[in-house]
Image: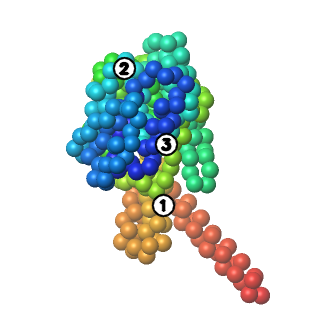
Amino acid sequence: MVVPAYNPGDLLTRSLSSVLTQSMADLEVVVVDDGSREPQEWVTGLDPRVTYVRQENRGVSSARNVGVAAARSDWIAFLDQDDEWLPEKLALQLDLVAANPRAAFCCTGFDWVRPEGAVHGDPARLTYRGLLSTQSALLSSMLVAREDYEAVGGHDPLLVQMQDWDLFLRLTMGGRDPVMVPDRLVRYHLHGENASRDYATAMRERLSILDRHEARARRLGDGMTLAAVDRGRSRTRELFAHQAVDAAREAGRSHDGRGVFEHGTRAGRLSPAVVATAVGQAVAARVHGRGRGSGERA
C-alpha cells in the first residue's frame, strides 16, 4: 500500500499504525516523501517494515504513481497521511475481490471525522454514470489491481484537486463496476488544511473532466452517458456555488470586501438559486436576531 507524505508531522504515525496493525500480516508499505521541507525526524522513526522513497516536490498524484512503481504487490491500496484504517479493512476487501474477479476496484464505507463528531460516508453502489452525475468514492478506501491501475495510466499528475475522481471514472468507463464493502473501515479526518481546498481550481478541473467524458459519449452516440454528464455538470455548479457562498461569508467575517465580491459574484454565476437561498437565510437570521434583541430590551 502507498502513503504519500508531505510535512506530515505526527499525523503519519497514526496512519501507519492503522496499516501495520491490519489483521492480515502479509503486506508491504511504501511511504513517498513528496519533498517535505520540515525537519525529517519522522523518517528515522519509521517502522522497519516501511519502505521510504523521497522525490522532489511534484504533488500527490506523482507521489502515488512513484509509490506504485516501487511496490511489488499485485494489489494496490492508498492511504492519505492523516487518515486511518480499521483492522479488518484489507482482509475484507481481498475476500470480496477474490469472489468478484471482474470488479473495477473495491471500496469500503467510511466516516468523515470532524472535531464535532463523525459522519457516515454512504458506500452506495458506484457505476461509471453514477460517478459522472452525483456519486463519489474515497481513495483511502480503495483497493485496485496493479494491472488495472497501470492500464489506465495511474493518477494524472496534471490534476491537483480532482485526481481521485478522475481515476475512478477511468477505471469504470469500460463497463466494469466496483464492488463495495459496506462496513465503515476508513476514518477520513477533516481539518482546516483539507477542508479549505481551492474550490475554484477543483471546479475548473471537474468541469474539464466532464467535458472530456461528454466528448467521448458524443463520439460513441451514448445518450445515457450524456444525460449523466448533464446531471453532473448541474450538480457541480450547485456544489461549488455553495462553497463560493461559504467563502464569501468567511471573507465577510474577515472584513475582506474584495473577497466578498469575488466569491459572491462567482456563486451568482454558478447558481442564482443557491445565492438567493443564502441571502434569504441571512436576512431571516438578521431579522430574528433583531426581534429577539427588541424583546430583551422591553
Query: Which of the image's four quarters has the N terminus?
Result: top left
Q: Quadrant of residue 241?
A: bottom left
Of tags 2 and 1, the one toward the viewer is: 2
Q: Answer few, some or many: residues within 10 Å of disc 1's Cα (few below 14, many 20 plus, some between 14 and 19).
A: some
Q: Quadrant of residue 219?
A: top left
**Which residue position holds label 1?**
246
The answer to whether any part of residue 93 appears in the image is: no
What kind of element bears circle 2?
loop
The label shown at residue 270 is none
The span from disc 1 to disc 3 (Cα, nearest Å) is 31 Å
The span from disc 2 to disc 1 (Cα, nearest Å) is 43 Å
Query: Which of the image's four quarters has the C terminus?
Result: bottom right
Q: Amino acid at mark 3?
A: Arg
Residue found 70% across the figure and 81% down from its top: 293
Q: Position of residue 229 (x, y in %)?
A: 41, 35
Residue found 42% across the figure and 54% down from its top: 193
What kind of element bears circle 1?
helix
**Which residue position holds label 2?**
73
Instruction: Kindly check if marks 2 and 1 are in contact, taking CB atoms under 8 A apart as contact.
Output: no
Residue in the foreground of this view, choosing between 75 and 171: 75
Q: Amino acid at mark 1?
A: Asp
**Which residue position holds label 3?**
14
What kind of element bears circle 3?
helix
The span from disc 3 to disc 2 (Cα, nearest Å) is 23 Å
In this view, 222 is above or below 48: above
Q: Amino acid at mark 2?
A: Ser
Left or right: 146 as drawn, with respect to 82: left
Instruction: Kindly check if marks 1 and 3 are in contact, taking CB atoms under 8 A apart as contact.
Output: no
Q: Position of residue 282 (x, y in %)?
A: 57, 68
Reading the chain from its start, which is encountered first: label 2 or label 1?
Answer: 2
Residue found 67% across the figure and 73% down from its top: 288
Q: Answer few, some or many: residues within 10 Å of disc 2's Cα (few below 14, many 20 plus, some between 14 and 19).
A: some
